Image (cartoon, rainbow, N blue to C red):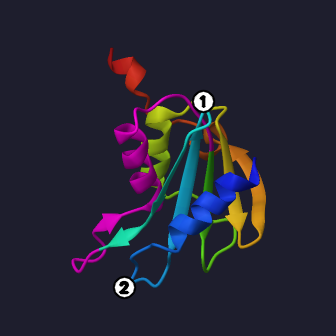
Amino acid sequence: MSHDLFEAAKAAMAKAYAPYSKFPVGAALRTEDGRVFAGANIEIASYPEGWCAETTALGHYIMGGGGKIVEIAVLAERMAKCSPCGGCRQRLAEFCRPETKLYLCDNTGVAETVTMGEMLPYGFRGDILK
C-alpha cells in the first residue's frame, strides 16, 4: 500500500462526527486507475443510527464514477487494527473482489493486511441475482 492511502484515511478520520461514541474512524479506498476516495463515520442524535467511514467512502466512490477497487485502508483513533463492521464488509463486497486488499491500520500505518475474501468468506454477491 502506498502511504497516501493511509494518510487519506487519517485525514478523513480527523473530520469524523462522533460526538456520542467518541470513536472516530476513517477509511480510504483506491481504484485501479489510482483515484482515492475517503470517508469518516458520522453519528446522529438517534444513536446508533448514522453511518460508518467505509459507507461514506463508498458514497464518494459511487459519485466519483466507481471503478475497480484494488485496496482499502481503515483507521480508528482509539483502536489498532479496526476492521469494517459486518454491514460495511457486505457493502464493500458489493464493489470489491475477494482478492481486494484490506489494510487494518494503527496510528502509524498498516498493522495487518487481509483480503476481503478473508474478512467476508461467504458474502452475498449481487452477481447471483442476474
Report the residue at 42% width, 62% height from top: 52
| Residue 33 badge | 1
Tell which of 75 and 97 is nearer to you. 75
Residue 117, compared with residue 60, is above or below; it is above
Q: Residue placed at 39% from the left, 19% from the top?
A: 128
Residue 97, image x, y percentages: 58, 30
Residue 88 image position (x, y, % from top left): 45, 51
**Toward which corner of the image does residue 50 lie, by quadrant?**
bottom left
The residue segment tinted magenta is 44-71
For badge 1, the amino acid type reads Asp
Left or right of 36, for residue 105:
right
- Per the rendering, the mark at residue 13 is none
With respect to residue 19, does 124 lie above or below?
A: above
Image quadrant in which the C terminus is located: top left
In the image, 65 versus 68, the foreground residue is: 65
- 81, above or below 90, in the image: below
Residue drawn at x 49%, y 29% as measured from the top left: 67
Mark 1 closeness class: few <14, some 14–19, many ≥20 residues within 10 Å: few
Give the residue drawn at x 42%, y 83%: 21
Is 94 displayed left or right of 80 in the figure?
Answer: left
In the picture as drawn, the residue positioned furthest to the top comes out as: 130
Q: Secondary structure at mark 1?
A: loop
Is residue 123 located in the magenta-colored stretch of the structure? no
Q: Is residue 125 left or right of residue 116?
A: left
Q: Position of residue 49 (x, y in %)?
A: 27, 69
- Look at label 2 and name its amino acid: Tyr
Residue tagged 2: 20
Q: Quadrant of residue 116?
A: top right
Q: Residue furthest left?
A: 46
- Select label 2 or label 1 by which is in front: 1
Label 2 sits on a secondary structure element that is loop
Across and down, in percent, residue 18 comes to 40, 79
